[in-house]
Amino acid sequence: MTEVILFTQETCGACATQREKNEGIEDAYPDVEFREVDIQTDLETAEEYGVRKTPTTLVYANGERTAEFIGIVDRDELEAAIESAGKQSPGLANRLASIILG
């Protein structure tokens, strides 16, 4: 599963710009889960992900971070990261761990 998390805050002008750039992207990737986290109202989640600046966009594939963008990210860069994450083999980390740990 691919997940995209956008960390924002209400007073952040660049966050509004990022939202505009992302507009309609959910329709283009119906199998991707998109979330927005306001770091002022959900500081715990921001700390959990190690986010200190907004906007920050994180892309995950099967629970593993595959891309991180701090600041405004162009739509084509974000789409490339989503498509790359979608190609990640499910359970890759588990298979590697079993190989390494033997």
Image: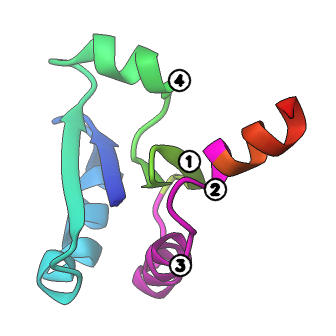
Image quadrant assignment for residue 28: bottom left
Distance in Å between CA atoms under marks 4 and 3 = 25 Å
Disc 2 element: helix
Q: Which mark is residue 87?
A: 3
Extreme top residue here? 44
| Residue beneath the point at 32% across and 48% down | 5
> Mostly what secondary structure, the magenta segment?
helix
The x and y percentages for residue 8 are 28, 40
Q: CA distance from mark 2 to mark 4?
A: 23 Å
Percent across and percent down for residue 81 are: 53, 74
Name the residue located 83 percent from the left edge and 44 percent from the top edge: 99
**Residue at label 4?**
50
Give the residue type that dot 3 points to.
Answer: Lys
Coloring scheme used:
rainbow
Amino acid carrying mark 1 in the image: Arg
Q: Quadrant of residue 11?
A: top left
**Of discs 1 and 2, which sits in the foreground?**
2
How many circles with numbers are drawn on the protein? 4
Q: CA distance from mark 4 to mark 1?
A: 12 Å
Q: Which residue is mark 1?
A: 65
